[in-house]
Amino acid sequence: MTDLIKKFLIFLIIFLVLAGLFSIYASPLEQSKESDISTLITLINEEKIESIQISGSRLELKLKDGSVQEIQKESNESLSSLLKNYDVPADKIEKVDISVKSESGLGFWVGTLLPFLIPFLLIAVFIYIMMKQVQGANSKAMMFGQSRAREITNQNLREKITFKDVAGVREAKEELSEVVEFLRNPKKFISLGAKIPKGVLLVGPPGTGKTLLARAVSGEAGVPFFNISGSEFVEMFVGVGASRVRDLFRRAKKSAPCIIFIDELDAVGRQRGAGLGGSNDEREQTLNQILVELDGFDVNTNIIVMASTNRPDVLDAALLRPGRFDRRVILDMPDINDRESILLVHAKNKPLIKDMNLRTIAARTPGFTGADLANLLNEAAILAARRNKTKIELNDVLESIEKVMLGPERKSHILSEKEKKVTAYHEAGHALVAHTLPHADPVHKVSIISRGRAAGYTLKLPLTDKYLHTKAEFVDDLAVLLAGYATEKEIFGDTSTGASNDLKEATRLARKLIMEYGMADKLPPRTFGEKEELIFLGREITEQRDYSEKVAENIDQEIGHFILNAIKTAQTVIKKMRPNLEEIVRLLLEKETLEKEEFEAIFAAKGTPA
């Protein structure tokens, strides 16, 4: 309806412009004085007329004083007969220069026919455009089943991405280099009877660079790259997704060799037979068509299908069999070396100070993905700009780490003196126990400044990246988690709601120790429970119990045993090192924030080794 109104307004503007032009043509800018025939006779007799120009039934009189007058006469009467009827002397007429101007064809059409043709032309144009729009709607309905994949070629790729632009993931790049070599020189493999995998599945947590790596493969191979999301196949109407899959592979075959990249494959690749739509489920029809296109009767196409997902456990088994997505490329969380190289890539277009140590930043960001690190440097740049700096300093980056992990500082969240004291003891308890226990991570910062939903925080970071965790480390982690609770109880004889999140995390960790890791003392080393998932909902909603009620009671007892022992451990440390605790609290109330050096100096002054 809005487009129709716009078109009507355009037609109206065009009509007004044409009408204005016609009025200008019909009524010239230089207006002449209108006179009657008696005036003409008088002027001729008085010999005031220099010339007369006859144009149809209109007479244009040019007087000797330079003025111009116009007279309208009868169209079927000539000027000579008119003057004769009025007995104008012939000698007077001879003194006037009389000329006849013939009317041009253009003037005739414009003056006579155009006023009638303009409305008909506008109506005809309007009807034509309306019919064109109806035909376009019909063609769009026919195009509903066509693929919406975006094609990227070397001609329209603004910034070509190669493996050099993807930091880290060395093993993944080595795996994908085979795909690049096949796309560059397929005869080398075909001559030896080798078949390159048709489907390459990129598996990894969100933000590890799956899409970026797929574009790098396209940039290295120099072939067309079709990019589409798994959710773009699925529509309300049954059969549309399968039609789009067929159209996508038809387009790809014309551009072969090429790469098809399906982002978030689990949107259409989930296990079949568990949906609500039965055999006519649109998602299942789409998946069936993808399976056929991957490994059907047509096996001689140089098309490599790449897909990404962070949920490989929910994919249909037919997708993962040999001949389809039979090669998995795992993208792990980056270690400290990878994080440093990722920071180097994202720091290229940012003005850092000369002595910026990216290794320090990499060490302070365990568990960060490539996307997190890019966001970190962006937040640091924003923070430096807000402080009117010309270069990004280390303090800006370190503060941005805390902002990304915990949220921005809540300076308006002002605690009362009592709440501030409780928070100081709570965080000091976390830091003291973490520093004392041998298997806990070192403390890097303690603060009672509110960030996000936390009134204060203790920042602990491991010395190295860990891939395996021992029971002793988990036990110490439980003690550190419950140290704030134990400190409040020890100092004030009461507890506050500030320990609610610590208790939740400690309970979750203790349950995992028993039910997933088999680290319970009074239970056999086995797992307990199998999580089930309703696939069409896409989240875990139930857990199948493969143990008896008696075992469930023992699990609850073991969870309580872990938690109570952790509290006892924390209380022992707090009682033994009460002077250190009081010193930490005093400095927190004075400075609000303690960095690693200031924190460790407390123990050095008390004669306690770091």
Image: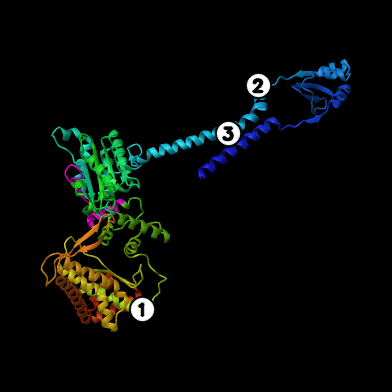
What residue is shown with label 3? 122
Q: Quadrant of residue 109?
A: top right
Sequence-first tag of 3 and 2: 2
Q: Residues within 10 Å of mark 2 (few under 14, many from 20)?
A: few
Local SS, label 3: helix
Q: Which residue is mark 1?
A: 419
Q: Position of residue 403 (x, y in %)?
A: 34, 63
Q: Quadrant of the C terminus?
A: bottom left
Q: Amino acid at mark 3?
A: Leu
Picture residue at 64% right of the left edge, 23% below the top: 106
Q: CA distance from mark 1 to mark 2?
A: 97 Å
Residue 533 in sight in this render: yes
Q: Label 3 crowding class (10 Å Cα cut-off): few <14, some 14-19, many 20+?
A: some
Query: Can you identify the residue that label 2 sits on?
Result: 105
Viewer-nearest of discs 3 and 2? 3
Mark 1 neighbour class, 10 Å CA radius: few under 14, some 14 to 19, many 20 or more? some
Q: Secondary structure at mark 2?
A: helix
Residue 225's place in the image compared with 43, above or below, is below
- Residue 358 image position (x, y, % from top left): 28, 57
Q: Secondary structure at mark 1?
A: helix
Mark 3, mark 1: which one is toward the viewer? 3
Identify the amino acid type marked 2.
Gly
Q: Is residue 195 above or below residue 273?
A: above
Say what amino acid the circle numbered 1 marks.
Glu
> Can residue 339 be found in the magenta stretch?
yes
Q: CA distance from mark 3 to mark 2?
A: 23 Å
What segment carries the magenta color? 321-345
- State the image coordinates of residue 424 (x, y, percent, origin top left): 32, 77
